[in-house]
Image: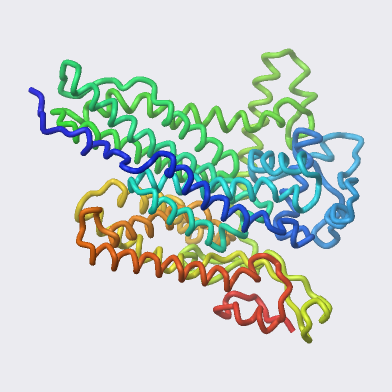
């Protein structure tokens, strides 16, 4: 018997606002964030922090299909100096390709993305940072759209995009050729796909409920392309850094829970049986086979050339096509076990390393760039500073801690799906690092938090929605809520503006630099 109390609007709340403004508003916010990120993108004219690895690896991928050893070492970075002088002769020349293959600890996709910018704009700071700035800007647009879909409010979507645009860590990593901004991008893209899939799934269930013969466990919902897209994005995240697997597991569980909730909400008598029998098998493919395929495809350059570390090309090509495939897979897996061993034993000291439980309070940021010996004429004072400090905007980060607790309380009290999904995603990107800190004493850094920054923003946005209240709330309630939300956005904006000089390598007086170091833990040693 049908339960005619089932409401399409309850299961899939409509977007009551203009679709046009739903795009124009987020695009405007993304343009604002893009201007911040692309302005003086080539500053500093230097190889910043771990750019020394990824910039050259990306350039090697363009020319050889795999990473290649470069001239010099950490004590004498010959290749870095040549790059900054415009000399692209940076690779070692070897009689045997095995001697020139470079051992690298991360998959290639993020470096291929950096390489795209180098191919378009040349081997210079703007070129190798272009892709990071682009995906950083696109992530602002994506988050604004996701927040709009989750809250059914264009205003709140734009609020979320603005907060992400004003986060210091997101800003710095969008202007630096490191891998973590690409990891964040693909994780957020996967989450966005799943949120759309959730809506589409419920729409299909309502259509079935209204028009088809009923069954206790519901229908098979057919191909779910948005969920498959999420699988592709999660495979891409893992192909940037292996820590993408944390989100792969969490999002797979989240998607199945949403399926159970949808079948239960429609009033089926056996919703869980339906979810496990009809939704789980295709979900296993979407979160298993699809990410695995995307990950393997990212290694195409390694498979089709003789330049990769441990490739064993001559051996693989010695006994026919079948042996070529088998030996190539064997060599590839052996390489992965070597990388796993490297990550498991990565415990060397670094002055900016930190423990994960200190990350939410920004205890130990990472100094990406701080040259010494700047002339006093550079800033008109006795001592000058030029810094790129990898740190989040404190007002946003501290506010997000309260917002995350608020989301947990909201979920416990009302089981709102949004209030559960956001803390789960945050936990997936943060809590696994506790194991590596405690069990392995691994070397880790604050910027490992960048994949969860969008979810910090979403938590703040959800709490902002509660403060604003529903559209039919009392005018006083709406006005006071709007004042509180607007005041918070203004505080974040001022906080970001204050920090901007030490996020973007502006040359300032040393006194101005010191004024922006909010804690002694923000510096390893005071400049003299």
Q: What is the quadrant of residue 459 in the picture?
A: bottom left
Q: Quadrant of the N terminus?
A: top left
- At x 23%, y 27%, the residue is 206
Asked whether residue 284 appears in the rendered view, the answer is yes
How many numbered circles does the render carry?
0
**x and y percent of residue 121 in the render?**
78, 44
Q: What is the quadrant of residue 227 in the picture?
A: top left
Q: Relative to 362, say whether 407 is above or below.
A: above
Residue, far left: 1
Q: What is the quadrant of residue 69 in the picture?
A: top right
Residue, far bottom: 382
**Left or right: 340 as drawn, with respect to 101:** left
Name the image colouring: rainbow
Q: Relative to 142, say whether 214 is above or below.
A: above
Asked whether residue 432 appears in the rendered view, the answer is no
Q: Relative to 213, say whether 108 is above or below.
A: below
**x and y percent of residue 182 in the render?**
59, 46
Of residues 155 and 44, the one drawn nearer to the viewer in this rendering: 155
**Left or right: 180 as drawn, with respect to 225:** right
**x and y percent of residue 512 in the render?**
66, 81
Q: Relative to 291, say whether 240 is above or below.
A: below
**x and y percent of residue 384 in the render?**
75, 79
- At x 44%, y 65%, the residue is 489
- At x 79%, y 29%, the residue is 306
Q: Quadrant of the C terminus?
A: bottom right
- At x 64%, y 28%, the residue is 330
């Amino acid at each position: 018997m049908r339960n005619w109390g089932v409401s399409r609007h309850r299961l899939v709340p409509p977007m009551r606002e203009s679709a046009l403004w739903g795009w124009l508003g987020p695009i405007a916010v993304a343009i604002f964030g893009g201007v911040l990120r692309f302005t003086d993108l080539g500053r500093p004219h230097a190889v910043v922090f771990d750019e020394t690895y990824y910039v050259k690896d990306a350039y090697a991928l363009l020319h050889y299909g795999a990473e290649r050893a470069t001239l010099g070492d950490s004590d004498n970075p010959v290749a870095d100096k040549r790059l900054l002088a415009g000399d692209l002769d940076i690779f070692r020349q070897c009689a045997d390709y095995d001697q020139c293959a470079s051992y690298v600890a991360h998959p290639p996709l993020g470096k291929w993305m950096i390489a795209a910018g180098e191919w378009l704009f040349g081997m210079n700071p703007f070129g190798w940072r272009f892709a990071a700035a682009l995906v950083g800007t696109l992530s602002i647009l994506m988050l604004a759209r996701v927040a709009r879909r989750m809250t059914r409010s264009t205003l709140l979507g734009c609020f979320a995009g603005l907060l992400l645009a004003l986060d210091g860590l997101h800003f710095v990593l969008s202007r630096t050729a490191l891998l973590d901004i690409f990891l964040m991008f693909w994780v957020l893209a996967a989450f966005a796909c799943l949120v759309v899939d959730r809506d589409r799934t419920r729409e299909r269930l309502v259509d079935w409920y209204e028009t088809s013969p009923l069954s206790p466990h519901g229908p098979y919902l057919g191909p779910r392309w948005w969920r498959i897209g999420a699988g592709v994005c999660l495979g891409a995240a893992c192909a940037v850094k292996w820590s993408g697997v944390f989100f792969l597991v969490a999002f797979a569980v989240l998607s199945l829970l949403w399926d159970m909730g949808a079948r239960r909400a429609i009033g089926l008598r056996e919703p869980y049986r339906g979810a496990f029998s009809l939704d789980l098998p295709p979900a296993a493919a979407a979160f298993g086979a699809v990410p695995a395929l995307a990950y393997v495809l990212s290694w195409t350059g390694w498979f089709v050339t003789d330049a990769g570390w441990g490739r064993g090309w001559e051996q693989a090509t010695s006994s026919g096509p079948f042996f070529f495939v088998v030996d190539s897979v064997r060599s590839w897996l052996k390489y992965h076990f070597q990388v796993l061993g490297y990550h498991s034993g990565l415990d060397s000291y670094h002055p900016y390393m930190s423990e994960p439980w200190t990350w939410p309070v920004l205890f130990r940021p990472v100094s990406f760039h701080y040259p010494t010996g700047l002339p006093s004429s550079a800033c008109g004072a006795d001592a000058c500073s030029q810094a790129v400090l990898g740190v989040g905007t404190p007002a946003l980060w501290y506010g997000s801690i309260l917002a995350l607790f608020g989301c947990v309380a909201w979920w416990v009290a009302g089981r709102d799906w949004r209030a559960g999904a956001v803390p789960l995603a945050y936990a997936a990107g943060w809590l696994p690092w506790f194991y590596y800190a405690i069990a392995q004493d691994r070397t880790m850094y604050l910027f490992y938090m960048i994949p969860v920054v969008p979810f910090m923003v979403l938590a703040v946005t959800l709490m902002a929605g509660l403060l604003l209240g529903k559209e039919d709330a009392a005018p006083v309630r709406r006005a006071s809520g709007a004042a509180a939300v607007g005041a918070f956005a203004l505080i974040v904006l001022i906080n970001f503006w204050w920090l901007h000089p030490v996020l973007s390598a502006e040359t300032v007086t040393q006194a101005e630099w010191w004024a922006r170091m909010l804690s002694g833990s923000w510096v390893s040693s005071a400049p003299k």
